[in-house]
Amino acid sequence: MVGRLSLIALLLTGGCSSAKDDELAAAKGARSVLAEWSAVERLDGARRLPAAYADVMRDKAREALATDRKSIKDAEAGQAVDLVMDAATPGAAALAAAGTHLQQAVDRLEAR
């Protein structure tokens, strides 16, 4: 009986750990996407990228952020992603700021 309870407790803790790991991976992924998207916006603003390429990269970034957002439970990190996703055309500075907020969330999640 004690063995079964120990096994159940272990499985439950493993499930929580997995959810936290998923959230951490999603926050790190979203942070990376924001950094890449910010670079695209800077390069596009300097007219160093073909417009079609920049448009495709924006679409791919939005798709990746939408996927990562589903796993992000941290309120501040979620709000940072939501602000970018809700903006019609976020600029490089806004994307970088959102990335900074996500880095802070990553730090909090890693500390848990």
Image (tube, helix red, strand yellow):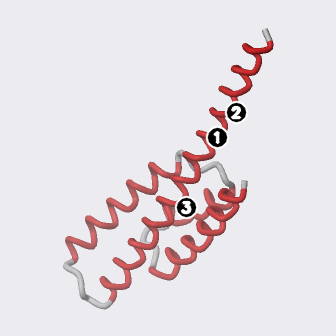
- Secondary element type, mark 1: helix
Q: Name the residue under label 1.
A: 17
- Secondary element type, mark 3: helix
Q: In which quarter of the image is residue 37?
A: bottom left
Position of 14 compared to 61: left or right?
right
Relative height, residue 55 to residue 20 (above, below) = below
Q: In which quarter of the image is residue 105?
A: bottom right
Position of 106 compared to 44: left or right?
right
Q: What residue type is labelled 1?
A: Ser
Q: Which amino acid does label 3 sit on?
A: Val
**How many C-alpha atoms fall within 10 Å of the one at disc 3: few (<14), some, or many (≥20)?**
many
Q: Residue 35 carries which label?
A: none
Residue 59 placed where, x, y %? 32, 61
- Give the mark toward the camera: 3 or 2: 2
Q: Name the residue under label 2.
A: 13
Circles 1 and 2, Cβ within 8 Å, touching? The answer is yes
Q: In which quarter of the image is residue 83?
A: bottom right
User: Which residue of the protein is positioned furthest toward the right in this rendering?
Assistant: 2
First in sequence, mark 1 or 3: give its number.
1
Q: What residue type is labelled 2?
A: Thr
Marks 3 and 2, how far apart in space?
28 Å
- Secondary element type, mark 2: helix
Query: Image quadrant for the N terminus?
Result: top right
Marks 1 and 3, how far apart in space?
23 Å
Q: Residue 81 carries which label?
A: 3
Residue 41 placed where, x, y %? 37, 79
Measuring 55% from the left and 61% from the top, which residue is drawn there? 81
Residue 49 placed where, x, y %? 23, 81
